[in-house]
Image (tube, rainbow, N blue to C red):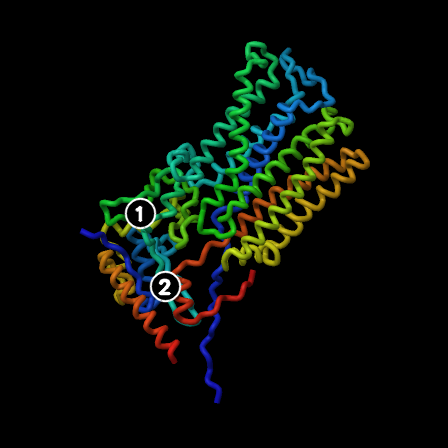
Amino acid sequence: MNTPTAPSIFPRKVCSPQKEWGEIIAIYLYLAGMGAGSYVIGILLLWIGVPFNLLPTFGFDLFGIHFYLSKAPLLWGPIMVSIGAPFLILDLGIKWRFMYACLNPRTSWVARGFIILSVFIVLGLLVFAKSIFPFQWLRPESSVWFFVEFIAFVFAFATALYTGILLKATKSVPLWNTPFLPILFLASALSTGSMSILLSTLGTGLLSYDSPAIQGLLVMEQVLIIIEGVILYIFLWGRYRSSEQGKESVRLLISGKLRYIFWQGIIVLGFLFPLVLEWISKYYQSPLLLGVAGLSLLTGGFFLRLGLLQAGIKDQIPMQRLVEFQYGLKTAPKSF
Amino acid sequence: MGHKVLVVDQRKCTGCRQCELVCSVYHTGASNPSRSRVKVVKWESVGIYLPMTCNHCEVAYCVEVCPTKACHREPEKDNRVVINKNLCIGCRTCIVACPFGQPFFDHQERVTVKCDYCDGDPQCATFCHVKAISYVDADQANMAKKKEAAHKLADLLKQARG
């Protein structure tokens, strides 16, 4: 006679992704990364002196003052970051206490990030304001401005890296706990940032397909997308091999509940569409196609952050592992 | 004098969840287990229950990642790790960072909360009649853990020998 066996599979899902950080934090990380990447690329183009098809006097008149917009597409990154920062505040339990968030920079990356973003926003907006205001008393040719631009550049680079380091610093999520994550977010920040420069010039006539600047940007854009794709592959491969929870996170992204975000959002919108459309738009010199490619890339950049946030599965609690080991329990089937 | 710690013996736990109830009553004044600082993890189909309390780790990730120093250690009070509600901004970074799934977000107070040993008289240990949770000297707890580990090793060796 067959004796009934005790159920060997327990109903509780062991590998459930974290729920604390969701869409709001993804928007914050995305805008901070894109804005910082845009400033890094823009200021480099400005320093190198890439020739543009633009008039230095391009701009608009308001209250009898002429505002110059010829450099605005290269320097508007800090505006994006300052739009993104309130999303972090929006996610806080008690929003008015956001100023407390800089009290522990010695060990906390949230506090360090608060300081990094604040410095970048202030200096970046100063540089942006200098570029559009016509006032001579600002002494736009002064070497002091180069110093300000340089400090802002350093902090922009730190901001782009920080978005990845923030996740890496929470050591209990194997998917995030790798130096490849800040590198991946940096590559994404640079590609989305340079694309935001291209998009902001569409229809203004500031850049045309004849200009070396747009040709250089398009080539750089495609190279950055390919580099980002390679880093994403190495990142996922490394995480898959890192631990049980890392493997589950990658599974969740590739074939689990988040597969639509991964394949359609990250891979198709973030990599394939922009690569193909940019190449076609270069061939046909079509700004419309470039615009579609740009929007697709920017959407893909957002989904990259969202997907990686939502796939973050924490390490299994040691006591839970001990109980499973002690009683010979099997891991629950992955139903996500 | 050594400090005291909470020790959980999962084999004694019956899954009554009284610890959750008394914890929430002590800290919030309401018998609402969802606001408790201790959670009982259950494997219902095989009847295994595991009360999860904060370990007040020596190297506490929650303290490391807290941007406001709201999460801090109090060496003079059993070396416990506590959260100052007046400084907490509710960023939930400590929840993401803790490998033991411990600090909890209190949706009513909009801050993160965690075990504070009930200021030296942990209610979960006091009201646990089967003594699945006990509040003992850290040295004693370490010795008990070492003994348990030795017993487990001995059992495994016996099994391996057939």
Q: Quadrant of residue B135?
A: bottom left
Nearest the eye: B88 or A220? A220
Q: Quadrant of residue A297?
A: top right
- Upstream in sequence: badge 1 or badge 2: 2
> Left or right: where does residue A17 sit relative to residue A193?
left
Q: CA distance from mark 1 to mark 2?
A: 21 Å
* Chain to which the residue tagged by mark 2 belongs: B
How far across and down, in percent of the image, does residue B136 sit?
A: 23, 58
Q: Residue furthest right?
A: A284
Nearest the eye: B23 or A310? A310
How far across and down, in percent of the image, does residue A289 sit?
A: 76, 37
How far across and down, in percent of the image, does residue A231 sit?
A: 60, 46
- Amino acid on which the number 1 mark rests in the picture: Val
Which quadrant of the figure contains the C terminus of chain A?
bottom right
Circle 1: element type: strand
Which residue: 49% across, 66% down? A331
Q: Please name which of the two marks, 1 or 2, marks the residue nearer to the observer.
A: 1
- Amino acid on which the number 2 mark rests in the picture: Leu
Which residue: 50% across, 38% down? A162
Circle 2: element type: strand
Say few, some or many: other residues with alpha carbon within 10 Å of mark 1 (under 14 / 14 to 19 / 20 or more).
Answer: many
Label of residue A103 in the image: none
How far across and down, in percent of the image, does residue B141 sit?
A: 25, 60
Q: From the image, tell me which residue sits under label 2.
A: B50
Q: Residue furthest left?
A: B1
> Left or right: where does residue A279 sit relative to residue A78?
right
Q: Residue furthest front?
A: B161
Q: From the image, tell me which residue sits under label 1.
A: B81
Relative vertical location of residue A55 with respect to residue B20 in this rendering, above or below: above
> Left or right: where does residue A245 sit relative to residue B83?
right
**Residues beneath discs 1 and 2 located on the same chain:** yes
Relative vertical location of residue A203 with respect to residue A180 in this rendering, above or below: above
